[in-house]
Image (cartoon, grey):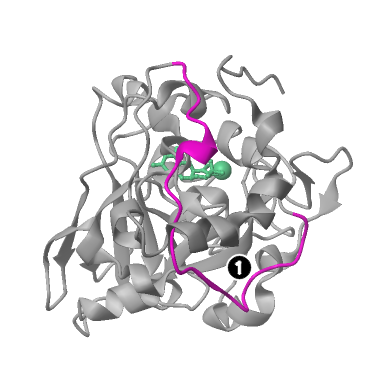
Amino acid sequence: MLIKKAPDIRWSEVTPERLYVNRREFIRASSGAALGALGALAGAAAAGPGVVTPAYAQDALANVRTSAFSTSEKLNSVEDITTYNNFYEFGTDKSDPARYSGRFKPKPWTIAVEGLVNKPGDYALEDFITPQALEERIYRLRCVEAWSMVIPWIGIPLGGVIRRFEPAPKAKFVEFTTVYRPSEMPGQRRPVLEWPYVEGLRLDEATHPLSILAVGLYGRTLLNQSGAPIRLVVPWKYGFKSIKSIVRLRFVEKPPPTSWSLQNSQEYGFYSNVNPEVDHPRWSQARERRIGEFLKRPTAMFNGYGDQVAGLYAGMDLHKYY
Ligand SMILES: Nc1nc2c(c(=O)[nH]1)N[C@H]1C(S)=C(S)[C@@H](COP(=O)(O)O)O[C@H]1N2
Ligand SMILES: [Mo]
């Protein structure tokens, strides 16, 4: 893995441990001052192409609660999390999102709520989520490519957000759409996937307490490569379900199309629950490499969240509904 670093970044000065240990101090220092959570949302720094925006330049998020849902596993570093990414809108290499997302402007940001819902509309990010409800959730993210990371997200339970819009009884699924901005997203100028990127969840999956919308990580707002200003995190599913830079939620009756199953329905199903027993047609899902580690480790059913989520799929054949 070769990662190109911009010369102006001194990651060594911001070891993840230090950033993490100091996070509460950052937060305390900034709360009540100019950097309230509201002002801090979506505050990504602008940078030119090829420049990796340093994580410490992001705004601190104030008044973040800790969550009982967090794993206590060793965290991946800020560097791992922000330079080894999948975000095809900025290119298909793991290093492309960090290198080519500098022109992207995540502020201001509006999210459209559409479909079978009592309160549709266009919501500014600041109205879409309640900054007071932000929590830190340390989750594993398992990519279908058989690697994983442990990431200290800052987010808000998606269920609470959804309930505010009052989905109609007929609504059974939620479709999510990424922004389409080829002028700022060089990967969208090539037909690698059908743009914009779309994803979907069953409504009971979306409102499950583990599903969150993330607006930050390591105590600060998201960098562009991580899906600024707002992205989904569904920890028991393969990473591609966790759609980035969301501009639309649509409530629908039928399973919505999803980018990866449109691209190859044999390889990618709608559910995409992490399942070590169901191989990807071209490789095994039984093991994974934790980024930063050498030896592979076994992959757990539902990425280790089975106790909480297995009930969502009771009676379903998970080989058929992959
Ligand atoms: N819009 C969009 N969202 C996306 C992707 C993408 O290419 N475009 N890649 C997905 C994949 S395959 C993974 S593994 C995760 C990676 O998230 P991370 O880069 O923050 O680790 O984002 C997902 N969300
Ligand atoms: Mo992925």
Secondary structure mostly taken by the magenta-highlighted segment of the chain: loop
Q: Dividing the picture into quarters, in which one does residue 308 lie?
A: bottom right
Label 1 sits on a secondary structure element that is loop
Residue 64 forms part of the magenta stretch: yes
Position in image of residue 319 (x %, y %): 62, 63
In-image side of 196 versus 10 (left or right)? left
Q: Nearer the viewer, residue 230 or 117?
A: 230
**Label 1, on which residue?**
318
Q: Nearer the viewer, residue 270 or 229?
A: 229
Crowding around mark 1 (Cα neighbors within 10 Å: few <14, some 14 to 19, many 20+) is some
Q: Residue furthest right?
A: 295
In-image side of 211 versus 285 (left or right)? left
The answer, for residue 148, to whether it is visible in the render is no
Residue 141 vertical placement versus 283 (above, below):
below
Position in image of residue 40 (x %, y %): 35, 52
Residue 237 forms part of the magenta stretch: no
Q: Residue at x 77, y 57 (%)?
A: 299
Q: What quarter of the picture does the C terminus occupy?
A: bottom right
Residue 189 vertical placement versus 267 (above, below):
above
Q: Dividing the picture into quarters, in which one does residue 165 lie?
A: bottom left
Position in image of residue 97 (x %, y %): 48, 29
Q: What quarter of the picture does the N terminus occupy?
A: top right
Residue 130 vertical placement versus 19 (above, below):
below
Ligand 2 falls in quadrant: top right
Q: Residue at x 75, y 63 (%)?
A: 300
Residue 108 vertical placement versus 252 (above, below):
above
Q: Dividing the picture into quarters, in which one does residue 104 lie?
A: top left
Q: Amino acid at mark 1?
A: Leu
Q: What residue range appears in magenta?
A: 50-74
Q: Residue at x 45, y 24 (%)?
A: 91
Position in image of residue 195 (x %, y %): 29, 35
